[in-house]
Amino acid sequence: MNYQEAKIKFVSTWGSLGTLWGINKAMAQIQALLFISTKPLSMDDIMAELQISRGNTSMNLRQLMDWGIVSKEIIPGERKEYFTTEKDVQELARVIAKERSRREIQPVIKILKEVSSIENDGSAETKELIKQTKALHDLTETADDMINKLVNQKQNWITKSLIKLIK
C-alpha cells in the first residue's frame, strides 16, 4: 500500500468511526485529513481532497472549531484561511472527552436529577420512577466525575490515570 492509498483508507475509516461517536462522516474525515497533514490546509484544499462541497466543508470546520479541536492558522502573505488540528493524540482525546461530557452527559445528568426529584405521591409507579432514575443519575454522575478526573490530567493523562487506578 502506498502513501495515497493509506491516506485514503485512514481518512475513510476515521470518517466511518466518527458516525459511531455521534459526529457526521464529513466532520470526522476533515479532522482526520488535518490530523495527518504536515501543514495547515485551506478550505479549498480540504474540499478538493475529500470531494465535498464548500457549504459542507465550511459547516463542518465551524463545528470542529466549536469542539475546540480545529483552529484557524494565519499564514503570512496568504488571503485564504488555513486550518489545523491538535496533533497530540492524548490532548485530542482529552478535549473530545471534555466536550462530549459538556454536550451529552451533563444535560442527561440534569434531566435525571430533575426527574428523580419529583414529588413522591406514594404510588408504586412514582416510587419506582424515583428509585430507578436516582440510581441512573448517581451512576451517570459518578462516571462523569471519573471522566472529568481523567481529562483534567494534563500531560500523558491516560497513562497517569491508569497507573493511579492500578495502585
Image (spheres, grey):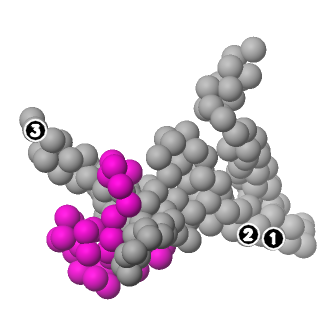
3 and 2 marks in contact (CB < 8 Å): no
Q: Is residue 123 visible?
A: no
Where residue 124 sits: x, y (%)? Answer: 80, 62
Magenta range: 35-63
With respect to residue 138, does 31 lie above or below?
below
Give the foreground label among 3 and 1. Answer: 3
Q: Residue furthest bottom?
A: 55
Work out which residue is located at the far top of the displayed protein and give it: 167
Between the C-alphas of marks 2 and 1, the distance is: 5 Å
Q: Label 2 is placed on what type of residue?
A: Ile
- Determine whether the residue tagged by mark 3 lies in a helix, strand or loop: loop
Of the image marks 3 and 1, the number of the one nearer the N terminus? 3
User: Which quarter shows the C terminus?
Assistant: top right
Nearer-N-terminus badge (3/2) = 3
* Left or right side of 108 for 124: right
Q: Is residue 121 magenta?
A: no
Image point (72%, 38%), residue name: 153
Q: Amino acid at mark 1?
A: Glu
Instruction: Residue type at mark 3: give it.
Output: Asn
Q: Is residue 158 left or right of residue 49?
A: right
* Residue receiving disc 1: 114
Q: Quadrant of residue 18?
A: bottom left
Label disc, if present, on residue 2 of the rendered structure: 3
Residue 77 is situated, as x and y percent measured from the top left of the image, at 40, 75
